Image (cartoon, rainbow, N blue to C red):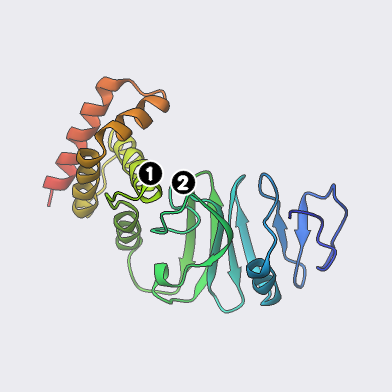
Amino acid sequence: SGGGGGGGAGGGGEGDSEIGIGDGARVPRLAGGLPSGLGLRRLLAERVRDVAASEDHAILLDTFGRAHGLGYNRYGQSAPGCGRLRLSAPRLLGATFGGERLLQVAAGGGASAVLSVGGDSLRARCAAVLLSAMRPEEDADVADVATGVCVQLLRWSLVCTAPGLSAVAAQCLLVAGHQGEQVAAEWAAAGLPPPLLLDAVRAVEAMRDAE
């Protein structure tokens, strides 16, 4: 559980806000504490080089330049394309980044970011991650993640445009058509006026047709 890191550098008592590991790196506590278990112990044994954490998810970077995600995954912030709502053990994200060596990680709210040594553009990488997350399937968890990502794209489309995302826009419209009730419910739950949803759909349609 998320107790003090007695086995790591600078480990403290139960009241500490961080868990000490490795050669001085520290892992901020997630809400409810970090999970224990073999997966996390193995990861910490490999020496975590960098950690980024929001209130409820974390991205850990090991000394081999590989990222591991755990915690809340509603929008794919812990493991893009995974489909699970919460990861109780670290998940290696090697496939997400094509095996590239990563230099730095960041996490906040419902999003995560990495800095890699690869040559792909950030736009292309983001598009690939969004496409992998928006899969209209019957599996409840996968469908829930797809709905959440689609609603975020619909919201963003009202305030900004981004070239090169026609395939992502088309996939979002497919999800909205397949899971229309869920999309409308999540839109309303976010406190957004229902008439704006139609405007957002039109904006995403324009994004799809722009290329």
Please tell me which residue is depicted at 28% across the width and 51% down the height of the picture.
Answer: 137
Q: Exactly how many numbered labels are in the figure?
A: 2
Task: In this rendered view, identify the residue nearer to me: 127 or 122.
Answer: 127
Q: Work out how far the residue at label 2 is from the one at label 1, CA to CA, in angstroms.
A: 8 Å
Say whether residue 183 is left or right of residue 191. Answer: left
Q: Residue 198: x, y in percent?
A: 21, 27
Q: Is residue 106 above or below residue 204?
A: below
Q: Is residue 77 above or below residue 100?
A: above
Say whether residue 205 is left or right of residue 27. Answer: left
Please tell me which residue is depicted at 26% across the width and 39% down the height of the picture.
Answer: 179
The disc placed on residue 127 is: none
Q: Is residue 191 above or below residue 26?
A: above
Task: In this rendered view, identify the residue nearer to me: 71 or 96.
Answer: 71
Q: Which residue is mark 1?
A: 144
Q: Residue 106: x, y in percent?
A: 55, 56
Q: Quadrant of residue 18?
A: bottom right
Please tell me which residue is depicted at 34% across the width and 42% down the height of the picture.
Answer: 147
Task: In this rendered view, identify the residue nearer to me: 144 or 118.
Answer: 144
Q: Secondary structure at mark 2?
A: loop
Q: Quadrant of residue 183?
A: top left
Q: Secondary structure at mark 1?
A: helix
Quadrant, the N terminus: bottom right
Identified by mark 2, the residue type is: Arg
Q: Residue 166: x, y in percent?
A: 19, 51
The disc placed on residue 74 is: 2
- Which callout, 2 or 1, points to the residue nearer the camera? 1
- Do the numbered discs 2 and 1 sit on residues whose CB atoms are within 8 Å? yes
Say whether residue 30 is left or right of residue 188. Answer: right
Identified by mark 1, the residue type is: Asp
Task: In this rendered view, identify the residue nearer to me: 162 or 23.
Answer: 23
